[in-house]
Amino acid sequence: MLTYQKVRIQKDMMKETSLNDKLPSFSLEATGINTCRESNLLGKWAVLFIYPKDNTSGCTREAREFNQRYSEFESAGIRIFGISKDSLASHTSFSKKLNLQFPLISDPQTQLIQSLNAWKEKSMYGKKYMGAERSTFLIDKNLTVRYIWRKVKVEGHVDEVFDKFKELISDL
């Protein structure tokens, strides 16, 4: 039997996050800051990049590229957050291995990933399974989603994100 609260959460998660929507509320464990909430993103621009799995080639490359440009993003007033369904222990190890300067958010129940519509059916070697779709969200100071990248290709993506930020703030 579902309680009212559980039903409400499930209905909220069915709505796809779109441009100009508010970032959904969340409270999840993260490296470096213990618990990460949407309020941690308030007051500065933020990049929230969803990736499939720690210690895989594409995810490692993406995290490294964001890390290499970290000081540029920080100087521009942009916070960076990575998120996957991996455990906090896995994130801690991955973060230390790459010497990451930004938090990795652990979403083992995929609540935030699903609410951002990045939990998709995938296929590998003919086998279907559910997994995180590599996606990035550019979020403004008021927690409004200003740009979304779906099915991200790692090559050149970090540059694309920074360029889009510059374009958006020049329009303000």
Image (cartoon, rainbow, N blue to C red):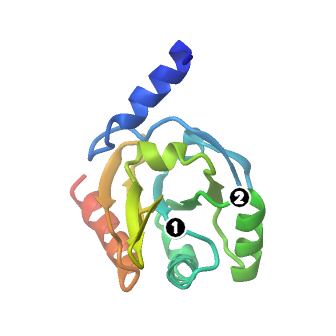
From what the image shows, is residue 64 above or below residue 74?
A: below
- Residue 65 is situated, as x and y percent measured from the top left of the image, at 51, 82
Residue to which mark 2 is pinned: 87
Q: Which residue is the site of mark 1?
A: 52
Quadrant location of the N terminus?
top right
Q: Amino acid at mark 2?
A: Ser
The image shows residue 58 at horizontal and vertical percentages of 50, 82
Q: Could you tell me which residue is drawn at 36 percent across and 70 percent down?
A: 161
Q: Nearer the viewer, residue 167 or 33?
A: 33
The image quadrant that residue 28 belongs to is top right
- Looking at the rendered structure, the kind of residue marked 1 is Pro
Q: Position of residue 113 (x, y in %)?
A: 48, 50
Please give the name of the residue rendered at 28% of the width and 45% of the height, measured from the top-left corner.
18
Task: Decide which of tag 2 and tag 1 comes sooner along the chain.
Answer: 1
Residue 64, disc: none
Asked if residue 83 lies left or right of residue 101, the reply is: left
**Residue at point 51% right, 45% down?**
112
- What SS does tag 1 mark? loop
Number of marks in picture:
2
Above or below, 94 against 104 in this view is: below
Outermost residue to the front: 126
Query: Spatial distance from mark 2 to mark 1, Cα to Cα?
Result: 12 Å
- Would residue 43 be visible to someone looking at this image? no
Q: Nearer the viewer, residue 74 or 136?
A: 136
Look at the picture and state if 100 lies above or below 115.
below
